[in-house]
Amino acid sequence: MSGTPAGRKEITSTADFDLSDPTFWARPMREREHAFRLLRDLEHPAFYEEMDVPYAPKGPGYYALVKHADILEVSRNPEVFCSGDGGATNIPDMPPEFTEYFGSMINMDDPRHARLRRIVSRTFTPKMIKQFEADVEAASSRIVDDLIAKGPGCDFVAEVAARLPLKIICDMMGIPEKDYGFVLDRSNLILGGFDPEYGGDDMTTVAEKLLTAGMELQGLVQDLAAHRLEHPTGDLISSLVNANIDGERLTAQELGSFFILLVVAGNETTRNAISHGLRLFTENPGQRALLLEDVEGRLPGAVEEIVRLASPVNFMRRKVTRDHEMNGRLYRRGQKAVLYYWAANRDESVFPDPLRFDILRSPNPHVGYGGPGPHFCLGAHLARREITVMFRELLRCLPRIEGGRPERLHSSFINGIKHMECTF
């Protein structure tokens, strides 16, 4: 691999990098692609020591699962590979004080997970999603009009990609427009973590900022929930606080954690898919031309291919509940396995020529919304709708819009684009 800057070791084998080292995630994308290809070529998953963090005891290390088949098998076996023992969204075990704000159903197992998902899914219905589809179209139209008025050279992430999912989720929950900026800022901090623009590189300080952001978001939604109990409207908060599913209701803490999950997962991941999508069409003008020939017919496939290559969530973690053999490897109780969706979506055995952006790719069994099983993304339908409508509107009004060089988020968890200038 040529052109490696002085002081940074060239990657020629799996011994040349460490997934637990934060500096790995600051490497250029081509180097990251090469590293994960080397990991997929191994006969068995590589094992890594966990990084020392001041807010949690050092764990036993983890296996890096990078093959599509392994991701599917683990996802289908939640009884063996659990999410609730220490959390799924972080490699170190989540400290108890974090669970009050980030202990959502994504970090739970059955029966608690099933109970929460049952309550939420009864209110997060296709009817409610359908109700907001017109809002997605209206918001996308307004966003593109505002972009045209602002003119080329502006930040596509801030002006387009971040605005749509933020507005839709806040409107669904009943968050007033005056609080949009507050919600965006806190969600950036929660997922921006160790990026200098958001959290910084001091782990203790970052942990304190995460807790504060979680507390503030939970406080916002709990205040609204208390009002909706007496004055219900048609929003999701009203449905959730007044829902009585087989005698079950969400507690105030559960509602707050669900909101944090929804606003962080729904906002950050969809905005990054939209941002990556523009960059992919910029780098692949032939695919843009192909889409413009038949936007309605080819856009659904284009959205799936964008999500595959963007893979906005790099990984989720699982912990082994009992000794289990998988693909010739024995996983011991208490060990950790990290599911690298980003790497699985580039598995050569499943996706021919995996680095090629191909809007006609079929089949396209990506795991961009997680693997099969109880933790498959509840909002996948809404996310697909937002990405579809946003690109339909962009290509209708600005068919030659392009994204410049992306400024990437420094994160092992989110494959994010912080800023990207656009021209049209």
Image (cartoon, rainbow, N blue to C red):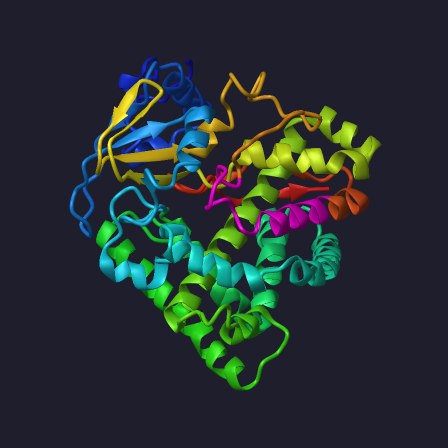
Please give the name of the residue rendered at 39% of the width and 42% of the height, measured from the top-left corner: 413
Whether residue 339 is in magenta: the answer is no
Relative to 102, is 349 above or below? above
The residue at the far right in this view is 293
The residue at the far left in this view is 57
Using residue 419 as the reference point, say whether residue 127 is left or right of it: right
x then y, percent, for residue 96? 23, 59
Whether residue 386 is in magenta: the answer is yes
x then y, percent, for residue 303? 66, 38
Using residue 325 as the reference point, say whether residue 247 is left or right of it: right
x then y, percent, for residue 197? 40, 51
Residue in front for this viewpoint, 382 or 248: 248
Q: Quadrant of the N terminus?
A: top left
x then y, percent, for residue 383? 61, 49
| Span colored in magenta | 369-391
Q: Is residue 404 visible?
A: no
